[in-house]
Image (tube, rainbow, N blue to C red):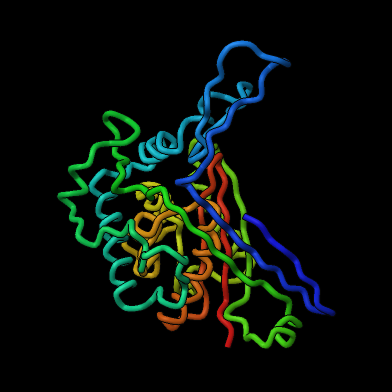
């Protein structure tokens, strides 16, 4: 993730861009304990989750994201069937949104790549197919490849500007940031941190859940998403939450998901006729962030 601030007279414009190539994540070597080390070293994958862990950190904080999600699932009592039902809804909603043209003006083609839509969407999946998948992190677990977000590549960019930037660029803004929130809790329950972050963002925006017409939640895992919805007091099938699918279907390239969520929320407001939306996501090691967005014009 990177951001570039451009000043043009009295206008400030920030170009925020995020790129994540999870299929090209490098393997790294730990720093040797002494100069000119002898012996062999082990390569470490940087694709996802904990990489080079500080040995002074408590072991219970450094479990994999999948195991942490299983622990959150245990705490919040989310069943395997509930997770698979949530995942199925995500795939079907994403497929329907693509078919209806919702994402057409939110994506651009990559030269040399013959890809018309996100390839991880499984429009043909069923509860029976999802139920047949094996647990990915525990032999007796409930998190599977079907009810978790896949590993994807992606890039995104958002243009942020001051009021003066509108006249300088000749572009009408789509929305304004009305409030932001960040929160942290026990790293094992990183997936639950969006609850406090979302409530903080709404409070700073001076609005409540009754004012929010669209919610974009990153859907790292189905059980994590359901835990957040219940923590926020929303039903499992809340129609304003990810109505056009989420990361379980679309993918979750970590460095670009925040911008994608914000823009999907903005366009979701236009489709639903609402004025305010919320984008929120969990962050590994126990964090959550959220942004309340207000439509302009």
Query: Is residue 196 visible from the viewing direction of this image?
Result: no
Q: Nearer the viewer, residue 71 or 89?
A: 89
Q: Nearer the viewer, residue 89 or 227?
A: 89
Give the left or right position of residue 82, taking residue 48 as reference. Answer: left
Q: Nearer the viewer, residue 190 or 168?
A: 168
Which residue extends farthest top? 38
Q: Quadrant of residue 69?
A: top left
Give the left or right position of residue 253, taking residue 2 as reference. Answer: left
Q: Quadrant of the N terminus?
A: bottom right
Task: Give the tally of numbered discs.
Answer: 0
Q: Residue at x 34, y 69 (%)?
A: 239
Give coordinates of residue 160: x percent, y percent: 66, 72
Q: Residue at x 39, y 70 (%)?
A: 240
Q: Residue at x 37, y 37 (%)?
A: 70
Give coordinates of residue 110: x percent, y percent: 47, 66
Q: Quadrant of the C terminus?
A: bottom right
Above or below: residue 128 compared with residue 27:
below
Give coordinates of residue 46: x percent, y percent: 52, 37
Give the left or right position of residue 12, taking residue 110 as reference. Answer: right
Query: Is residue 159 visible from the viewing direction of this image?
Result: yes
Q: Residue at x 38, y 49 (%)?
A: 150
Give coordinates of residue 67: x percent, y percent: 41, 34
Which residue extends farthest front? 112
């Amino acid at each position: 993730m990177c951001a570039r601030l451009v000043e043009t007279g009295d206008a400030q414009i920030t170009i925020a861009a995020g790129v994540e190539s999870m299929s090209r994540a490098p393997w790294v070597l730990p720093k040797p304990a002494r100069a000119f080390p002898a012996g062999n070293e082990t390569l470490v994958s940087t694709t996802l989750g904990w990489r080079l862990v500080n040995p002074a950190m408590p072991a219970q904080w450094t479990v994999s994201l999948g195991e942490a999600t299983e622990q959150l699932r245990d705490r919040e009592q989310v069943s395997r069937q509930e997770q698979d039902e949530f995942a199925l809804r995500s795939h079907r909603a994403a497929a329907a949104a693509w078919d209806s043209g919702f994402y057409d003006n939110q994506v651009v083609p990559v030269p040399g790549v013959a890809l018309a839509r996100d390839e991880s969407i499984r429009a043909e999946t069923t509860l029976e197919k999802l139920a047949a998948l094996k647990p990915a992190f525990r032999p007796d677990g409930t998190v599977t490849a079907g009810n978790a977000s896949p590993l994807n590549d992606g890039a995104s960019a958002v243009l942020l500007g001051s009021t003066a930037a509108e006249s300088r660029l000749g572009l009408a803004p789509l929305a304004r940031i009305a409030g932001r929130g960040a929160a942290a809790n026990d790293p094992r329950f990183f997936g639950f941190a969006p609850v406090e972050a979302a409530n903080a963002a709404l409070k700073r925006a001076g609005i409540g859940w009754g004012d929010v017409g669209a919610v974009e939640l990153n859907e790292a895992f189905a059980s994590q998403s359901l835990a957040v919805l219940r923590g926020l007091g929303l039903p499992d099938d809340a129609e304003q939450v990810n109505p056009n699918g989420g990361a379980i279907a679309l993918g979750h390239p970590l460095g670009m998901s925040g911008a994608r969520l914000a823009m999907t929320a903005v366009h979701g407001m236009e489709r639903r006729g609402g004025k305010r939306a919320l984008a929120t996501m969990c962050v590994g090691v126990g964090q959550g962030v959220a942004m309340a967005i207000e439509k302009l014009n």
